[in-house]
Amino acid sequence: AQSVSQHNHHVILSEAASLELGCNYSYGGTVNLFWYVQYPGQHLQLLLKYFSGDPLVKGIKGFEAEFIKSKFSFNLRKPSVQWSDTAEYFCAVLNTSGTYKYIFGTGTRLKVLA
Amino acid sequence: IAGITQAPTSQILAAGRRMTLRCTQDMRHNAMYWYRQDLGLGLRLIHYSNTAGTTGKGEVPDGYSVSRANTDDFPLTLASAVPSQTSVYFCASRVSGRASDTQYFGPGTRLTVL
């Protein structure tokens, strides 16, 4: 069965620190990959997505993610975090064959200290 | 454009009662989804619908039912609520296509079952 693993459940950083959140998935076929962000009290919003082409994907608010097929990974990065990046981040995989269901990771709660 | 609306915003419910969570989208997306979000478990798919008139079971369907009479509405019903159904429920719709597959989420319904 497909699964998505996010290794860091809670991350605390100071402003201006660099961020990398891990995401690994298990599925051998073609996948589309996503990172969603949920700010406190809000619903999930799309941060970035990968479908094909350049494995380095740039999203909103200075975030980027790199798809490494050989490692089944899609890690999220940001060179310098801000207090406003405090949120929960979810990695998701879309199985593009069959049911077209999204599988979400358990999320990573990021707290950025001012 | 409202996107996805959910009602109610929050609800406290006695165990054994029947409850319907409403979800409406105005984007004419074919696919819609219901998730529950629980601390440490991320988002788990309850039911989905790839198009009006069809529904399917997700990861945690027991105790829930859905219907999809038209494109816009996708209500989720708890026939006889139990305390383990206390959660935040998110409805989502999906626009599909190469390089554009994205899920859009509603604001959520916070349900407490006592």
Image (cartoon, helix red, strand yellow):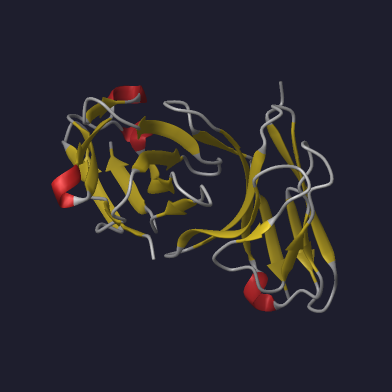
* Residue B59 on image: x %, y %: 54, 65
Drawn side of residue B25 relative to residue B84, left or right: right
Given residues A98 and A11, the one toward you in this image is A98
Drawn side of residue B107 relative to residue B73, left or right: left
Drawn side of residue A109 relative to residue A11, left or right: right
The image quadrant that residue A52 belongs to is top left
Q: Is residue B16 above or below residue B36?
A: below
Residue projecting furthest to the top: B1
Q: Residue at x 74, y 28 (%)?
A: B26
* Residue A90 on image: x %, y %: 39, 47
Q: How many marks?
A: 0
Q: Residue at x 56, y 41 (%)?
A: A43
Q: Is residue B65 above or below residue A78?
A: below
The image quadrant that residue A32 belongs to is top left
Q: Is residue B90 above or below residue A67?
A: below
Given residues A29 and A105, the one toward you in this image is A29
* Residue B56 on image: x %, y %: 65, 58
* Residue A41 on image: x %, y %: 55, 44
Quadrant, the N terminus of chain A: bottom left
Q: Residue at x 70, y 61 (%)?
A: B111
Given residues B41 and B94, the one toward you in this image is B94
Quadrant, the C terminus of chain A: top left
Q: Residue at x 82, y 79 (%)?
A: B16
